[in-house]
Image (cartoon, rainbow, N blue to C red):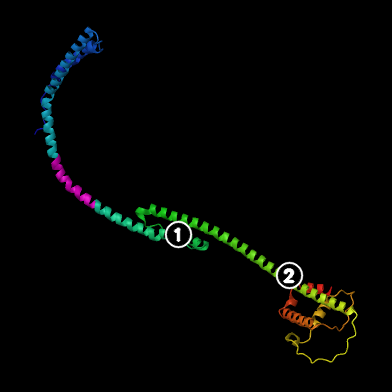
């Protein structure tokens, strides 16, 4: 194979094609406009044009093949020569490419292993902050946010951007959780205040109701005593027939209620006297005769009053008002 090009006079070979180009001008003028093929002359002209143009076209293609034949052989030889040189060059190049590819793959594996370790470090040292969010109060979340803010991002190299994004995301989530917990704690504190106020009002209401019941009990007791006294006074004012002397019966044993010590009205009388109006004279001490049932009832009422006083009823805030009403 040589690099010498074939000795060809290209201008002489193109003369034949130039003749076709010159004839093309006349052919375009004669057949450039399609005739009316529905007429006899137009149809004949169209048929003649097709035949003449076909002859020029086929002959032109033959001229092309004749002119390019020696060049095709030269091009074929060049292609074969180039292919041989390319294969020899590739035989030297391919081992170098294989060695480089092997090294690139090894370096990439090492890089990916390093990146995997760095990403695992991101999971352990950054993302793990989110594992401790649940259950923390606002103070704990604030401390966790400060700790996350101090995360050191040096040494992440290829994944520095990922580490920065992870840190920013962790700080954002902790801040959001901190805001939600603060709101819940505020609402819980407000609810606790409301519950405490309701409890205080309920206790005050229960205390007032208890005091009202005690006052009503004292009023009822005084009303009963007043009614008994009025009945006794009315009974005294009635004329009594002279009873016939009768033999005295044997004394009967007193009931259990009568075994109590005699009615001690000194404290009640003293309390009532202390709240009497200044202009009202003190009542005279009189002796009255009452029935056994009334006597037993007075003893029971006295025992009840003693029980109330022993439990501190005289320290009750409404005790003085009750004594004033009793003395009125």
Quadrant where the C terminus sits is bottom right
Q: Is residue 5 above or below residue 175?
A: above
How far across and how far down the image is residue 34, in percent? 25, 12
- For the point 15% across and 42% down, the residue is 89
Closer-to-camera residue (149/9): 149
**Looking at the image, which is closer to me, 294 or 96?**
294
The reply to whether residue 24 is in sight is yes
Estimate the x, y position of residue 100 in percent, counting from the top left: 22, 49
Of the two numbered discs 2 and 1 in the rendering, the one whose residue sits closer to the viewer? 2
Give the residue at x 67% y 65%.
201
Task: Specify which label sits upstream in the sequence, 2 or 1.
Answer: 1
Magenta stretch prevailing secondary structure: helix
Q: Which mark is residue 299?
A: none
Name the residue furthest top.
41
The image shows residue 218, relative to residue 77, as above or below, that is below
Q: Residues within 10 Å of mark 1 (few under 14, many from 20)?
A: many
* Mark 1: secondary structure: helix
Residue 126 visible in the displayed image: no
Residue 82 on image: x %, y %:
14, 36
Q: What stretch of residues is rendered in magenta?
A: 86-103
Instruction: State the image coordinates of residue 187 (x, y, percent, origin top left).
Output: 57, 59
The secondary structure type at the circle numbered 2 is helix
* Residue under numbered circle 1: 148
Which residue is label 2 attached to? 212
Crowd rating for badge 2 (residues with CA inside 10 Å; few <14, some 14–19, many 20+)? few
Would you say residue 100 sits in the magenta stretch? Answer: yes
């Amino acid at each position: 194979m040589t690099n010498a090009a074939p000795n060809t006079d290209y201008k002489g070979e193109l003369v034949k094609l130039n003749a076709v180009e010159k004839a093309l001008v006349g052919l375009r003028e004669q057949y450039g406009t399609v005739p009316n093929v529905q007429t006899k002359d137009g149809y004949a002209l169209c048929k003649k044009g097709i035949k003449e143009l076909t002859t020029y076209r086929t002959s032109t293609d033959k001229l092309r093949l004749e002119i390019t034949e020696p060049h095709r052989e030269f091009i074929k030889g060049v292609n074969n020569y180039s292919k041989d040189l390319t294969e020899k060059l590739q035989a030297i190049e391919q081992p170098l490419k294989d060695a480089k590819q092997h090294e690139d793959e090894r370096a990439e594996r090492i890089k990916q292993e390093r990146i995997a370790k760095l990403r695992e470090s991101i999971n352990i040292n950054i993302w793990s902050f989110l594992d401790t969010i649940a259950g923390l109060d606002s103070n704990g979340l604030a401390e966790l946010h400060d700790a996350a803010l101090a995360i050191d991002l040096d040494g992440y190299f290829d994944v520095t951007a990922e580490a920065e994004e992870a840190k920013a995301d962790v700080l954002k989530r902790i801040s959001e959780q901190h805001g939600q917990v603060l709101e819940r704690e505020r609402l819980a504190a407000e609810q606790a205040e409301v519950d405490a106020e309701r409890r205080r009002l309920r206790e005050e209401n229960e205390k007032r109701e208890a005091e009202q019941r005690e006052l009503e009990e004292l009023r009822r007791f005084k009303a009963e005593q007043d009614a008994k006294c009025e009945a006794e006074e009315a009974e005294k004012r009635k004329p009594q027939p002279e009873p016939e002397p009768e033999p005295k019966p044997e004394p009967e044993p007193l009931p259990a209620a009568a075994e109590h010590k005699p009615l001690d009205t000194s404290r009640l009388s003293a309390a009532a006297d202390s709240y009497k109006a200044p202009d009202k004279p003190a009542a005279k001490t009189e002796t009255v005769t009452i029935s056994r049932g009334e006597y037993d009832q007075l003893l029971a009422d006295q025992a009840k009053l003693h029980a109330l006083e022993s439990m501190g009823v005289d320290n009750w805030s409404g005790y003085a008002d009750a004594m004033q009403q009793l003395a009125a």
